[in-house]
Amino acid sequence: MAKKSWLLKWPALRQLANGDLAGLGDTAMSERTHSLKPRTSTADKIVGSVCPYCGVGCGQKVYVKDGKIMDIEGDYDSPISEGCLCPKGSATMQLVTGTHRGMNVLYRRPYGKRWEKIPLKQAMDMVADRVKQTRDETWEDQHEQGHPLRRTLGIAHLGGATLDNEENYLIKKLFTALGVIQVENQARI
Amino acid sequence: MAECHPVGFRWVMEAKRRGATIIHIDPRFTRTSAVADIHVPIRPGSDIAFLGGLINYIITNERWFRDYVINYTNAAALVSEDYQDTEDLDGLFSGWNAEKGQYDPSSWQYRGLEVTPAAGHREMFSGEPRAERGAIVSAEEHDFTLTDPLCVFQIVKKHFSRYTPEVVQEACGIQPEMFEKVARALCDNSGRDRTSAFCYAVGWTQHSIGVQYIRTAAIVQMLLGNIGRPGGGIMALRGHSSIQGSTDIPTLYNMLPGYLPMPKASYDTDLKKYLEYNESASGWWSEFPKYMVSLLKAWYGPAAIAQNEWCYNYLPHISGDHSHMVTVAAMADAKVQGYFVMGENPAVGSMNCALQRKGLRNLKWLVVRDFAPTETAEFWRNAPEIVAGDIKPEEIGTEVFFFPCAAHTEKDGTFTNTQRLLQWHHRAVEPPGDCRSELHFIWHLGRRLKELYRPSAEPKDFALRDLTWDYRSIGAIEEPDAEDVLAEISGYSLGDHKYFAGYKELKNDGSTVCGCWIYCGCYKDGVNQPARRKPATQQTWVAPEWGWAWPDNRRLLYNRASADPDGKPWSERKKYVWWDPEQRKWTGYDNPDFIVDRPPDYRPGPDAKGIDTLSGIDPFIMQAEGKAWLYDPNGLLDGPLPTHYEPEESVLKNPLYGQQCNPARMEWVRADNPYHKAWGDPDYPFIATTYRLTEHHTAGGMSRWVPWLCELQPEMFIEVSPELAELRGLENGGWATVSTIRGEIEARVLVTERMQPFVQQGRTLHTVGLPYHWSWIGRSTGDAANELTAFVADPNVSIEESKAFSVQVVAGRRSRKRRAATQGALVEREVAGPERDLPPVHQKPVGQHGLHAEKTEMTEES
Ligand code: SF4
């Protein structure tokens, strides 16, 4: 028995024994290759996702271990992409885990020459103050001919095509309530 | 498509494997051309001439699909006797109002119809997406023999009669033999047994006559019977994951969710008037009030009651065009104080970058949200005009906030992909550091503002006070629950809080809540439908259980047209949706896009109202008359039919008409946005077109920082033909300087036969190709192609013209980073040149189109 399995380590014999004459099947694999497992097999969880780049909407699987993303791969179940990702989709892992990502809020004072780090909450308060002040200063309640306007042209917004529907919905909902009408996104560009 | 939507293109390859003919029409030879059966190089900006040639070919060779055209389009409708065509007026339609500088569409109307108030009203505004809203008029007189010279079919025939293969050659640079090969292949593959599809990427719309490009393709597809049928249609391949979603739930100025129009100042002064102007008496838009009232209930909750018109008076009103370029021009004139930019990079991606940055410099405050500080966030630090020393940071008063954003893997939510498919992505990990989702940002901003305005007793602040804003907060970072928001978008009944299965359940009595009627049902039964991921192998080829498509999880729109007038499939091979006479209902592989129990032989009585007016042979249910429009009697702002006009900056005289450019185009005549001569400008003799690469993404915010992608495409380049290289002494791998009167950039030269000169009108025309991904920040940098482009736009949707303009190219690095937006036109000279417009159009009043001086001049009140 021991001898047989030793003999069968010889690839040519293994090919014969398994009928794999082209030598391209299982028999061509070394033991090391056999024992290799994808990194992703040790993931704690696999999360369903969608490629964030173009409009095709290829399926992605996000592999997570210890609260960190270990890899992002194509989703074979997707009827759109059947496991494929293009160069951009395949680079998603770097996009979301890369060192380029800013982690802090940055602030540039009027006429300033550099960025300063400021706390998130403070920045949010400052932006809310700016919105209120501009809105109050530039409010147009009605036209001189008497018809309603109820708006401000002092504030504008751009962006949405890379955002989620839920985000766009809240953007449009809040800005409309504030009377901000200059709301635009890449769909026109 | 192989370049920009590679994984979508694998299905084109699959079709090819099964015998389909792939035709690729593009100025450049790309990876798509490499595997296509036929590649047709076309001069940038001449597509309507080419498609018009196809229409002429289809009609003169009797290749149109008679049963489809007569029953499902408005071919037989009779048009007003006052109508005059571009054939009669040298490139203008009847109704040009020289004083207003725009068309009056009344002479384009169906015979016997007054211009409806709504149509007339909508005519006042550029930027109204009428093509998307569907039409609200029906023809009253018909000639089903299609012989009356004023029936739509004959008008279309006459309009395109001069678009012969010879004219196609003159305009597009395509040989007649090549043209006929394409036309024959397309016609041979259309009819009962076969269908052909058009795929385009949205660069196709980026022309000063962009909307009409798509209309021309639609006319071809209608004549061939290729709409609403499997394997047919016109597919817009969109470049962002959720750009379709951001139109459906619009971060756009002129619409509310679900293509409901924003109220228009001086017209829609109360709800009654708003509904009157926008509701249709027939067709599906007769349901309009239900969608609007449900939206107001979603936003203003218990405060919205019948007595206060469901808080309609909380909505702001638009007065004219408030689109991106109009707003940026106003910014440059210091008329806007604050700007939010979320996941977009206009300092690179939008036209005339230097003018964009001038706008940013004149703000009081700017908020940018992105992965890393983009050129838009850092315009004050190291933009070209700052490096050149024209402007100093200490002169720029804009206060700038940069907020790091969360990635899609760090938040829950849906994208709506290009095929109207909503897909949910789940949060895999928490966002790092101060990174937050836009959902988080906007929700907490809203909460703060509600708090700031709480003491206010001013009516202007009531909308904010009453705004429903209670979403479940999750975790330590207090992330709002995206599923809560999705549930509101989808809609539910008040009282028993039952989630709706679809928009047919919505009411106008205030008992239903729905944030976007076309998405109604995406949270059916309290189940997150877009999160469904049933493997492709375990369901039918239509794959209805993967994600959720709007409307009603329907995968193919207007699919009633896949059956003949009797409700039977046109052929066994192209079977999709059909009438089942036994069960007396529509059935098939997909959810039928029709009233499910309306038989094919149903004809409305004279008193029918609303959706009862749709007959059993009216597949196009969003149109008041249920028919597809070969001819648009309401008119787009630039005419009822597409017409070939040259780009704003061309190298050729219009070979068809005396009118050179789209008469209704939007121009921004200002010192920071100068234009070249209409054609034959000796300083700018070459054609330029911009495009994307597989390995980068739009303005680079998601790709120029990613090492793998930067390694694949490391720097900005210009593609030129060997002939142009020879003419200009350009060396492969060397440098070239490309300029317009607005700016100059440098790029590495790529000499390639993929670019070919066109020989037209006895001249050799050279085209250069410019990818537009780069700018000065990131891990791979280069000059931005959009430093060259101009503010000029289509009048219907205000989309810019970036795919065809004229440039100068010289060898070497000669750029001094000059920009018209900081120092005036790069070439000082007489402006006079050939006219773009015929005499009546030439008197277009100042400020009528585009922002010329005061922003208020754009409004209808002035
Ligand atoms: S993987 Fe490529 S083709 Fe697929 S969605 Fe992403 S960018 Fe588009």
Image (cartoon, coloured by chain):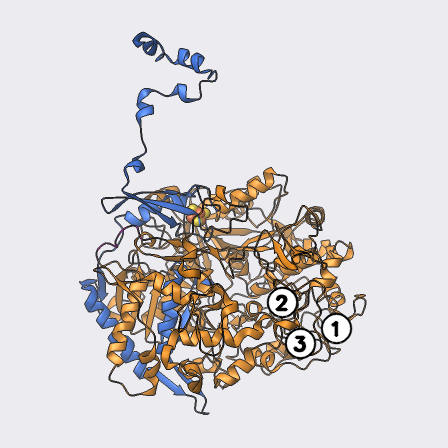
Dominant secondary structure of the residues highlighted in magenta in the image: loop
**Where is B271 relative to B764, above or below?**
below
Which residue does the image show at 33% across and 79% down from the upper left? B466
Chain letter for the orange colouring in the rendering: B
Secondary element under disc 3, as helix, strand or loop, is loop
Mark with earlier residue (3, 2): 3
Q: Which residue is mark 2?
A: B660
Q: Magenta residues? A: B426-433
Which quadrant holds residue B681?
bottom right
| Chain to which the residue tagged by mark 1 belongs | B
Mark earlier in primary sequence (1, 2): 1
Ligand 1 under 8 Å from disc 2 Cβ: no
Q: At which x and y percent is residue B411?
A: 31, 56
Q: In the image, are marks 3 and 2 on the same chain?
A: yes
Q: Chain of mark 3?
A: B
- Could you tell me residue B27's position as x and y percent? 57, 50
Q: Residues within 10 Å of mark 2 (few under 14, many from 20)?
A: many
Q: CA distance from mark 1 to mark 3?
A: 22 Å
Give whichever of B233, B523 is nearer the camera.
Answer: B523
Tell me where residue B321 appears, x and y as whole percent.
Answer: 48, 75
For mark 1, what is the residue?
B78
Asked if disc 3 and disc 2 are in contact, CB closer than 8 Å, the reply is: no
Residue B446 in percent (x, y) is at 29, 72
Q: Which mark is residue B608?
A: 3
Q: Which chain is blue?
A: A
In this rendered view, identify the residue nearer to me: B116 or A185: B116
Is the C-beta of the residue carrying label 3 under 8 Å from the nearest atom of ligand 1?
no
Does the image show residue B334?
no
